[in-house]
Amino acid sequence: MRLIKALLAVTAVAFAFGPVAQAEGRNPGSVLIYPIYDSQPGSGTVISITNVKNDPTFNANQNLNGVVDVHFIYIDGEYWTEFNRFERLTPNDTFTCLSNVHNPNSEVGFLYAIALDPSTQQPVSHNHLIGDEIVADGSGNWLYGFDAIAFKCLAAEGDAGDANGNELIDLDGVEYEAVADEMLISSFIADDVVTPMLVLVSLIPDDNFETRLDFAIYNNNEFEFSAEHAFRCFDVVDLIDIDESFGDSFLGDTNVDTTPNGLALGTTGWARIDGDEAVDVVGNEAKRMDPPFVGAFAQSLSGYSAGHLLHETDAKNALAGQLDTLD
C-alpha cells in the first residue's frame, strides 16, 4: 500500500519507471528464476509460486494428474553455494514463504524453481508454474517486487525436461526456452536523489567464470555512450557505479534534449545490455562468447521504489543458458 501511495503522490516520477516486461517470461513455465532474495538483517523477501494446472482428476496410479514437485535452489550471491528445498503443489495450489525461513543459510543471492515429476524426482515438462517476489530492504527502506522469470519446457506435457541427461536445465531452445540475446533497461532517471539498481544473474553455472557485459547507454536525445561491467554469479549494482555515463552530471551536459517534460528531477536515459564474453578467472577453460544472463531493474526515491524485469529482444542467445539440477 505504501508503494502504491508513493507512486500516486509522485506522479511525475511514476512515468519514468518502465512497465513490467510482458514477454515470454510472463507466461507459466517449468522453470522459474527469481532474480534476487535479500534476507540480511532488517530486510526480507517474500517468495511465491503457484501451480495453475487445473486438473483434479486421478491417473491409473490413483495420483492426481496435476500434482508437481518443485525443487527450489537458492544460490548464494557471493560464494555460489547452494541450498535446496522441495515443495509439493497439488492442482491450483500455491506456496508462499519468507526467504530467510525457507533458506536460513544464506542472506543474499538468487534462486530458481524446477518442476519435478513426483514419481521420478526428475525435471519434467509442467508449464503451469507462475511466481513472484516482494523484497523489502530495511537499510534503504526499499519495497519492490519482481515477477519470476519463467521458461517453458519444450517437451510434451509430462515428458522429461533433461532430455540429454546432462543434469542441467539447458535454456537452449531445445529442452527449454532459450535466453534472449540482449536485455534492455527501458528508462532510468539520472539524478542524485534517485537510486537506480540493476540485478544481474549469470546463466553459466560455474563460479570460476566472470561474465563481462557491454552497455550501450542513450540519453534523451539519442546520443549513445558505452560502458562495461563484469561480475561473477550474481550482482546488485547501482548504475552510477557501472559508469559515469549513467549520471546526471554527464548525461545532463552531453547533447541533452532540454524540452520541458514536467519532471523536476534529472535527465532520463535508457540502455542496452549485451553479453561480451565469460572468462575463466582460474584459466582452466576457454572463454565463452556472448554469455547468457537475466536480470531486473528497480529505482528508489525517498524510500519508495518500483521495479520490473529487464526487457528482452526477440533474438535468442546463441550460447545456451544453463541451470544446475543438483541431482
Image (tube, rainbow, N blue to C red):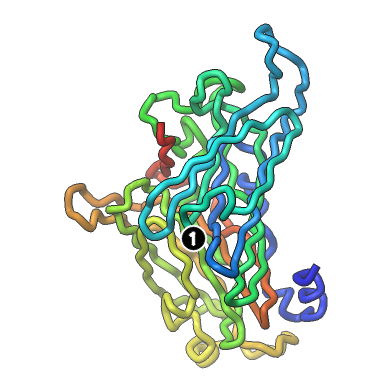
Q: Residue at x 70, y 90 (%)?
A: 264
Residue 275: percent from the left, percent from the top?
39, 57
**Helix, strand or loop for disc 1:** strand
Q: Nearer the viewer, residue 310 or 40?
A: 40
Residue placed at 60% from the left, 58% from the top? Answer: 309
The residue that appears at 40% across and 41% down in the rendered structure is 320
On screen, residue 253 above or below 41: below
- Which residue is outermost to the left? 284
The x, y position of residue 160, in whole percent, is: 50, 22
Q: Front-most of 168 and 47?
A: 47
Q: Is residue 46 above or below residue 168?
A: below
Residue under numbered circle 1: 108
Query: Split into 4 quadrants, where in the image is the C terminus?
Result: top left
User: At which x and y percent is residue 8?
Assistant: 82, 75
Name the image quarter holding residue 29. top right
Quadrant location, the N terminus: bottom right
Relative placement, left or right, of 284 versus 270 is left
